[in-house]
Amino acid sequence: MARRPPGSSMKLWGPILAGTVFLGVVACGEDAVPADPPVCEDPKKPEVSSLWQCGPTLDFTPINSYRGEFADVQDWEDAVVLIDGRCTGTLIAASAGPVVMTAGHCVGLGDRSLLVFNFEDEPDGDPLVTEGTVIEQSLAPDYALIALDVLPAVTPLLLSTQATERLAIIQHPRGRPKVIAEGRFLDSCNQLVYYADLDTLVGSSGAGVLNRHGYLMGIHTDGDCDESGRGANRGWTAEVIVEASPYLQSADIADR
């Protein structure tokens, strides 16, 4: 079998290799967006940042218009509440009695908060406006618990340590009617859970980070996404919150 002369092979591959090197340089330029942003860096002093959107569009769906892959979302969303018109919380199940969990930077210990359930476009339940007392509040971990004056006729959500490949946050961004956003689970470390392509805004603080089973595995507290798609949003895990809380018990965490 005749062999191709070495010179002709080099003439063919030379331009291809050069083009590959050029594309590699361009891909590593300062405008490149990493597929998975770096997470799990050394813990820093707790701070609340932009709480912003991941990518060029805000991918929120009004809760009662949602037809996505979280098929049971209508069974979970009634537990989500608007707090003082500026944060989000979730009614959770606890051995000592249901309480609303939210972010600690939203309220102060002993505060009396106004809570609005079923604030939605095309509401599908009975609205409830009630008050509650903040019985626990912390910034590290960033969480608070609110005992309600009147409990709504909804099923509280369970806590979990288990992530799934896709996560969802039901929230009141900027104090608006309830919406849902979905995104990818990235990692859980240093007491935090990280997620990408999952939009939040100011007002989304304190919303539950939900796995596919509708279990609350974290509390959204910080945003590090931008409109170019870089970065990730994050929150504190339910596990570390239970460890820090005198009110919550280890038995309050479900298996999934």
Image (cartoon, rainbow, N blue to C red):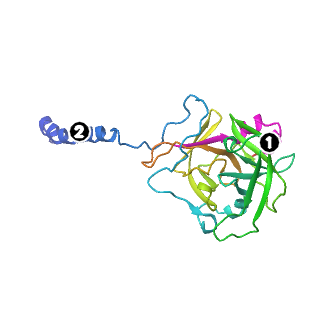
Q: Is residue 94 left or right of residue 209?
A: right
Question: Would you say residue 118 sits in the magenta stretch?
Answer: no
Quadrant hosting residue 75? bottom right
Query: Up-down: is 77 above or below 51?
Result: below
- Looking at numbered disc 2 in the image, what kind of residue is underneath it? Leu
Closer-to-camera residue (34/149): 149
Q: Is residue 212 left or right of residue 246?
A: left
Location of residue 121 in the rendering, given as x and y in whole percent from the top left corner: 63, 68
Closer-to-camera residue (227/76): 227
Q: Which residue is mark 1?
A: 110
What are the residue bounds of the magenta stretch?
Answer: 232-253
Q: Which residue is mark 2?
A: 17
Q: Are marks 2 and 1 in contact (CB under 8 Å)?
A: no
Q: Depth-wise, is mark 2 or mark 1 nearer the camera? A: 1
Secondary structure beneath label 2:
helix
- Looking at numbered disc 1 in the image, what kind of residue is underneath it? Gly
Location of residue 145 in the rendering, given as x and y in whole percent from the top left corner: 77, 44
